[in-house]
Image (cartoon, rainbow, N blue to C red):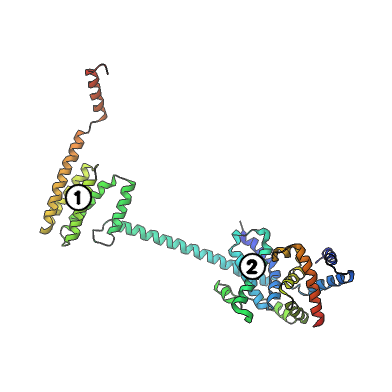
Amino acid sequence: MHFSKDFENIYIKYSDKIYRYVYLNTNDPYLAEDITSETFLRIWKKWKHIKQDFMQALLYKTAKNIIIDNYRKHGNAKKVSLEEIVEKGLEPSYDEDLIEKITSNDNIKKVNEAIKLLPQNLREVVILRFINDLTARQVGQILDTTEVNIRVLQFRALKKLREIIKNE
Amino acid sequence: MNDLNLKELTEELKIEGALEKEAEDLVIFSKNLSNLYAFERSDEFKNKFLEQELLTKNKFFGSRQMFATAFLSLVLLLGVTSVVGAQGSLPGQPLYPIKIASENIASFINPSFKDEILQRRSEEIKQLSGKKDGDTFHNTVNEYEKELNENKAISPKKIEESKKNLEEAKINSLDEHKEDIERVIIKTETRQGEVKGDEDRKISPEENNREINKESEYHPGF
C-alpha cells in the first residue's frame, strides 16, 4: 500500500482548514503553522493504525490537544512547539506571503479580536461551521456533541459575534 | 457555503427563533465571514512540507532498521564468537562457563554428546596437569569422575581416548597431581572393563532368534 500518497492527499485537503482553525484559536500565524505541522506529524506517526473514516474529526481534535498542551506549557507567551519540530529533523518554514496578507488585513484583525471575545464553545462553532464550512453534524463529531446542539449554538454564535463587531 | 447550504442555514436559524430578516442578515454575515478567511497556503509551501516530512520519516525508518539490523548482527556475532572461542577454554578461565553451558545445551539436544563431555574433561586434565593450580585441577578431576559415574551408556571408543589422555597427563604432570591422575585412571579402567563386559553380553537379533528356536525344540508344546 502506498500510504504516503494517501497521507499527501489528506494533507492537501485539510491542512489549510487546520491552519485556519489553529490561527483563529491562537491569533499567531507562525504558531499556527508550527501546530499544523505538529498535528500532521502526529497523525503520520500513527498513520497505519488510523481509520480514515473520521480523519477530519481526528485532525481537529489533535490540533486542539496541541493548542491546549502549548497553552499549558507556555501560557500566553505563545511559545511555539518549534523545538519539537526541529528535533524531528524538520526545518520550520512559513508561507511569508500569506502571513503578510493576513497580518496586514484590517478586517481580519478586527474579526480576530471579536472572535477572541466569544465564549470557547461559540468560538469553536463559528470557526468550524462558518469559517471552515463544516456541516453541523461534522462540527458535532469534532466537539463531541449533537447536531441539534450545534444548530442551537450556531444561532447564538452568529448573533453574538455580529453584536461584538457592531459595538467595536 | 453554497446557495443550497445557505438556504438550509436560513431555515435552521428560523427554527431556532430567528425572524425572517434576522436569519437572512445572519446568513449574509456568515457568508462574509467565510469569504474573509478563505485564504490558503501556497501549493509550493505545502509540497515543501510534504517532501521534508516524508523524507525525514523515511530516513528515520531507514536509520532505525539499519541500527536494529547492525545491533542484532553484532549480538549474533559476539554470541557465536564467544561460544566457539569458549570451546578451547580451560577451567578457571573467563569463557569456561560458556563452554559448560553450551555442553549442557548440546547434550540436552543430543544425549550422545555426553561421551564427548567425558573426553573433554580428560583433555582438560591433560592440559592442567602441568600447572600449579591445585584447586582447579582437583575440581576438574572431580568433574571427570562425575561424568564417568553418571554416563551409563558410554562408548568404548571415547573411554579409550579418555584413558589415553589421562595416561599422557600422568607423564607430564607435576608430582602433586599424580595421585589424583592415577586414581582416575584406575576408575576409568574399571569402567572400561564394565563397558566391555556389557558389550560382550549384547546378543545380536539373529543370535536371539536362534536361542528362541532352540528353546522351542526342547519344549515343542510352547
Q: Chain of mark 1?
A: B
User: Residue at position x 32%, y 59% from top?
Assistant: B82
Write the residue at 71% across / 75% down. Answer: A24
Tell me which amino acid carries mark 1: Glu
The picture places residue A160, in percent across and down from the top left corner, at 79, 75
Give a yes or no on whether discs 2 and 1 share a subunit: no
Identify the mark at residue A62; answer none if there is no mark.
2
**Which chain contains the residue that carries disc 2?**
A
Q: Quadrant of the N terminus of chain A?
A: bottom right
> In the figure, residue B81 lies in which quadrant?
bottom left
- Mark 1 lies on a secondary structure that is helix
* Kind of residue at disc 2: Thr
- Tell me, yes or no, whether the two marked residues, 2 and 1, touch with CB atoms within 8 Å: no
Q: Is residue A154 above or below residue B119?
A: below
Label ID, residue B145: 1
The location of residue B42, given as percent across then percent down, is 70, 72
> Total number of numbered labels?
2
